[in-house]
Image (cartoon, rainbow, N blue to C red):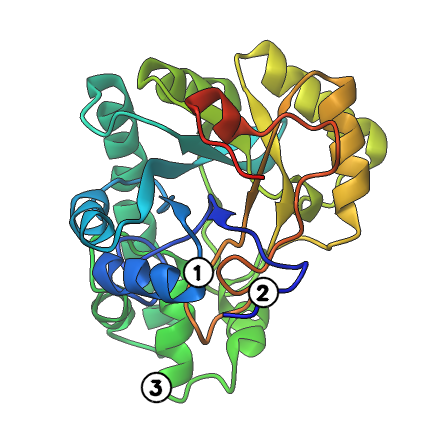
């Protein structure tokens, strides 16, 4: 396989059907292998249900699978996603915490469905759960169902008319504090990483404030390179990682072949001088 400078043999952020991805963990690992990536992390939202299946396929193909999770949290009213890498998926503290978030997600799905029913769109929760193929149901599944059923032309209309903030079926999030997410990940022996920090539309001052608070809470690092933030964020985030003595990570945020964000492994390397989170686990690339 011919690989460009935009290729990384390590990709530490991707999703399967266990959350809002479109591929089974088995098929996702196969795609990782076919792409040429050697080390991957499965980081499904708020659950680790796909790790066993992914681990079996990874062992078969010689892929190094880092167990992970992406925890939904909040910092100063701002939603922040925290990727946990190298976590023990059997850890009681982590699993009890994730169960709390999943219970909220269940309630929110029912509430979104109720609001859609009020505007003449019945059966949304059943439809969204069928789209999800797993317990984890999010707005993306309602979005796909609305488009498939012909209620909306595309995702932009689904969020702009029904699911987005202030719209007819919008249900505010009630995520856990960011500090608590970090505690769960650390309790499970993992490294807590701020996912796609360039995506949060924070001022430079606010971003530094977030990262400082995250580090003080026990957070390890940040995604310097992400498929779901602008490539131009790389240099600025790399400088912040070095200045704040934080580890760097990278990940495509791959959700499926027909979903946005980068393809698996299509990532620039970390900037010089940024310590990779994977180096502390004895993983090295040259």
Of the image marks 2 and 1, the number of the one nearer the N terminus: 2
Q: Disc 2 marks which residue?
A: 3
Q: Position of residue 74 (x, y in %)?
A: 53, 31
Kindly identify which numbered label has been placed on residue 65: none
Q: Disc 1 marks which residue?
A: 36
10 Å crowding of disc 1: few (<14), some (14-19), many (20+): some
Between the C-alphas of marks 2 and 1, the distance is 9 Å
10 Å crowding of disc 3: few (<14), some (14-19), many (20+): few
Q: Where is residue 237 in the image (x, y as percent from the top left)?
A: 75, 36
Q: Nearer the viewer, mark 2 or mark 3?
A: 2
Left or right position of 203 against 244: right
Quick one: 141 or 185, which is closer to the camera?
A: 185
Left or right position of 54 against 116: left
Secondary element at image label 2: loop
Q: Is residue 212 depicted above or below 74 in this figure?
A: above
At a point 41% along the width and 31% down the height, the residue shown is 85
Quick one: 281 or 250, which is closer to the camera?
A: 281
Tag 2 and tag 1, C-beta contact below 8 Å:
yes
Q: Disc 3 marks which residue?
A: 149
Left or right position of 210 against 157: right
């Amino acid at each position: 396989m011919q690989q460009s400078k935009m290729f990384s043999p390590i990709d530490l952020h991707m999703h399967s059907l266990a959350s809002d991805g479109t591929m089974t963990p088995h098929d996702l690992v196969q795609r990782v292998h076919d792409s040429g990536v050697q080390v991957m992390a499965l980081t499904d939202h708020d659950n680790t249900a796909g790790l066993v299946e992914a681990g079996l396929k990874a062992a078969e193909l010689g892929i190094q699978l880092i167990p992970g999770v992406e925890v939904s949290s909040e910092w100063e009213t701002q939603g922040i996603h925290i990727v946990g890498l190298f976590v023990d998926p059997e850890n009681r503290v982590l699993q009890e915490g994730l169960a709390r978030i999943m219970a909220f997600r269940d309630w929110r799905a029912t509430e979104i469905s109720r609001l859609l029913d009020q505007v003449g769109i019945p059966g949304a929760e059943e439809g969204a759960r069928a789209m999800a193929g797993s317990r984890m149901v999010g707005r993306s599944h309602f979005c796909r169902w609305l488009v498939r059923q012909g209620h909306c032309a595309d995702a932009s209309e689904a969020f702009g008319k029904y699911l987005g903030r202030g719209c007819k079926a919008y249900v505010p999030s009630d995520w856990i504090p960011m500090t608590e997410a970090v505690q769960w990940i650390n309790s499970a022996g993992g490294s807590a990483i701020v996912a796609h920090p360039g995506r949060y539309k924070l001022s430079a001052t606010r971003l530094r404030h977030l990262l400082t608070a995250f580090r003080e809470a026990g957070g390890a690092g940040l995604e310097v390179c992400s498929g779901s933030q602008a490539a131009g964020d790389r240099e600025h985030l790399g400088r912040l990682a070095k200045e704040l003595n934080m580890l760097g990570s990278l990940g495509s945020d791959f959700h499926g072949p027909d979903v946005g964000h980068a393809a698996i492994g299509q990532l620039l390397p970390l900037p010089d001088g940024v310590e990779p989170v994977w180096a502390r686990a004895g993983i090295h690339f040259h």
